[in-house]
């Protein structure tokens, strides 16, 4: 006797989608540390009971919010790297322009809340607490590396593409962390202006 194929999951309700959007806005403003359902619910016009009903648990809600942050940031980064002007009028094969575009986008003041949130999740996922951020750092690192490898000009040897992407991403992450910690835009931007391949 054959098995009955499982039906596709039901689409999320409009209320669930609306609350996920509102919770995401709250997370961007307040971060992960010390996050409690009661103030989150109050700020988003609902109750802890409704959030638990719609998302199952606080951890599941946070997993969905962090997945959204990761995918949203990755999508914006992909759009930046796909702009045709990244390789026009640049020396070499245009890799400097790719790294510079990514840095310019991520270091912009309007990106600060998302960068801060993803850094917080990144660092929490490296701790011994397996919480809802477990695996975030590894997934984000693979996402970013793959994105910058694929964005390089056709014909770039794979080993070279991976090496350059790894180095550029390490520099960008370090500079962003410095920017978040100190807020010294001029000093950090001067350092970022150096040739990414040196």
Image (spheres, rainbow, N blue to C red):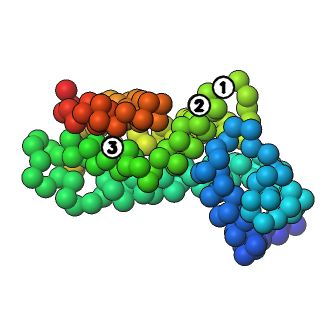
Tell me: residue 13, above or below residue 184. below
Residue occupied by mark 3: 103
Residue 186, visible in the rendered structure: yes
Residue 113: x and y, percent? 52, 48
Q: What residue is shown at x 61% (from left), y 27% (from top)?
A: 126
Q: Are marks 1 and 2 in contact (CB under 8 Å)?
A: yes
Residue 70: x and y, percent? 54, 49
The CA distance from mark 3 to mark 2 is 20 Å
Q: Quadrant of residue 132?
A: top right
Image quarter (top left, top right, bottom left or bottom right) of the C terminus = top left
Residue occupied by mark 2: 123
Image quarter (top left, top right, bottom left or bottom right) of the N terminus = bottom right
Is 66 left, or right, of 178 in this rendering? right
> Mark 3 falls on what kind of element?
helix
Res 127 label = 1
Which numbered disc, 3 or 1, marks the residue that appears first in the sequence? 3
Which numbered disc, 3 or 2, marks the residue that appears first in the sequence? 3
> Mark 2 falls on what kind of element?
helix
């Amino acid at each position: 006797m054959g098995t009955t194929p499982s039906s596709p999951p039901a689409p999320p309700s409009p209320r669930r989608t609306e609350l996920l959007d509102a919770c995401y806005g709250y997370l961007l403003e307040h971060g992960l540390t010390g996050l409690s359902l009661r103030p989150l619910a109050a700020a988003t016009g609902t109750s802890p009971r409704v959030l638990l009903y719609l998302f199952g648990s606080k951890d599941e809600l946070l997993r969905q919010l962090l997945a959204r942050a990761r995918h949203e940031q990755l999508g914006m980064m992909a759009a930046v790297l796909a702009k045709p002007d990244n390789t026009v009028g640049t020396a070499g094969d245009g890799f400097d322009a790719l790294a510079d575009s990514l840095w310019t986008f991520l270091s912009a003041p309007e990106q600060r809340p998302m960068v801060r949130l993803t850094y917080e999740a990144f660092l929490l996922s490296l701790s011994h607490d397996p919480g809802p951020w477990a695996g975030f750092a590894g997934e984000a690192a693979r996402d970013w590396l793959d994105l910058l490898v694929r964005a390089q000009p056709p014909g770039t040897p794979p080993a070279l593409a991976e090496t350059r992407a790894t180095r550029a991403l390490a520099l960008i992450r370090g500079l962003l962390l410095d920017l978040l910690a100190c807020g010294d835009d001029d000093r950090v931007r001067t350092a970022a202006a150096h040739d990414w391949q040196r």
